[in-house]
Amino acid sequence: MNRVTTLQVLFVGMLGLAVTTTFAASISINNPGFESPVLTDGGYIYSSTSLDGGWTNNAVNTGNAGILNPSSVMYPGGSAPEGGNVGYVYSPASSFGYNNLTAQVLGTNPAAYTVYTLTVKVGGRLDIGNNGYIVRLGYGDSIGAFTLLAQDNNTLAVPGGGWVTATIVYSNRTTIAQPLQIQLVAIAGSGVGNQMNFDDVRLDAVSIPANTIIPEPIPIGNAGFETPVEDDGSYVQTTSASPTVPGVWTNNVGADANVFNAGILNPGTNSYPDGKAPEGNNIAYVYCSTSGGNTTDSILAQILGTNPVINTIYTLAVKVGSRVDAPNAGYIVRLGYGDSISNFTLLAQDDNSLSLSNGGWVTSIVSYTNLIVIDRPLQTQLVAKPGAGVGNQVNFDDVHLVCAPYFPPGAMIMIY
Ligand SMILES: [Ca+2]
Ligand SMILES: [Ca+2]
Ligand SMILES: [Ca+2]
Ligand SMILES: [Ca+2]
């Protein structure tokens, strides 16, 4: 029997779950609150390899992860968010640039058309500093054989002596014949005793209809500007000898007098509250000061590895920020195509539609529905407009591009 139906484009994932759900099933996690073994207040265990209850370390530094019953020196009242114990991961100065972690391989494989929600409590001790966290959901039967599905790379500021809840939502399209794996990471820092704590790990799964259209991410190199690793307050900039930002970003240095018009920065407390990036530890800066010789827009661009596909909706999302200690004259986020900055055809842009507040971040979203064949690569451009004032710049972070099939209004799709 033939059946005629209309498919609807449902943006799940980046734009949130837009389908009616039935119920969430919890996926079993061993020792999810690190309550085994029972420890006295202030007590801890550690291991260079495995911990009680299924957690395994990457074992680069002996003792880099363990289980802890925090004392009142570490957290107010010596309490944990759940039970009495928490997990800890330690990434000391000696491992700067290398992040230690603890991981658990679960007994369940990723299922098709399933939305996974992972929540983890993340804490920072009062008596020891931290350089941020990463919570990862992926698959693979060992730490060395891990494939990332989604992560929260230090998007939340963790207060000393306090806890936040990291939440990852991932919509999975196809069955994967390897087990789910959770990784809890402490980002290495130059501080002594650099450590993150974790607790109350939960993973829920919800089935969604098998005709749900889940947008596909388009790979963007160095999308969070985390390469190279920079210490707090330090940066790398372009030079006349190397007119590109590390990774695959390129600037328009040939277009104006100032070659130092873009770079990568780990913001210090002088430029953003808590010295925090929206994602990870680094951000991009694009600098366009008329006092520095810039008279045209400064552009940081990436030419992507795919051409625009016909009948496809593209959605680009970029965090845009303004430093406390530097002026800005506005930003532009562009989606287009072309194999160089000068050979660029605009498809859609956000030309400074959001107001930037000093020390704050907004999310610029650019959407474009492509209905024609284009035989040149997609390109994204992050722009700072020229302005007076020393240090005139805009900052960018966490660049995401997804695509989904477009069905014209009223399109009838034959399903047999
Ligand atoms: Ca606990
Ligand atoms: Ca305690
Ligand atoms: Ca970043
Ligand atoms: Ca910082």
Image: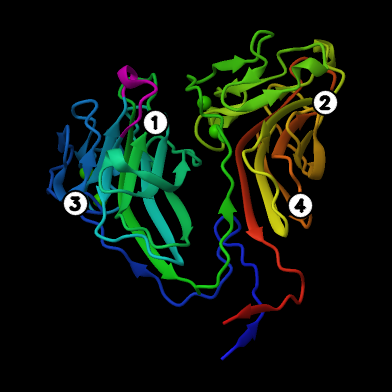
- Tell me where the magenta segment starts and ends, as one range: 92-100
User: What's the distance in space between the residues labelled 2 and 1, CA to CA?
Assistant: 35 Å
Which numbered circle lies on residue 297?
2
Label 3 element class: loop
User: What's the distance in space between the residues labelled 1 and 3, CA to CA?
Assistant: 24 Å
Q: Answer whether labels 1 and 3 touch (C-beta < 8 Å).
A: no
How many discs mark residues in the rendered view?
Answer: 4
Residue at disc 1, CB closer than 8 Å to ligand 4: no
Mark 3 or mark 2, earlier in chain: 3
- Residue under circle 3? 35
| Three-letter code, disc 4 | Val
Looking at the image, which is closer to me, 341 or 263?
341
Q: Answer whether labels 3 and 2 touch (C-beta < 8 Å).
A: no
Residue 101 on image: x %, y %: 30, 36
Label 4 element class: loop
Q: Closer to the camera: disc 4 or disc 1?
A: 4
Tell me the crowding category of disc 2: few under 14, some 14 to 19, or many 20 or more residues within 10 angstroms, Cα based.
many
| Three-letter code, disc 3 | Glu
Q: Is residue 171 above or below residue 383?
A: below
Q: Is residue 276 above or below residue 354?
A: above
| Three-letter code, disc 2 | Asp
- Whether residue 389 is visible here, answered yes or no, is no
Residue 67 on image: x %, y %: 20, 41
Q: Answer whether labels 4 and 1 touch (C-beta < 8 Å).
A: no
Which numbered circle lies on residue 187?
1
Which numbered circle lies on residue 373?
4
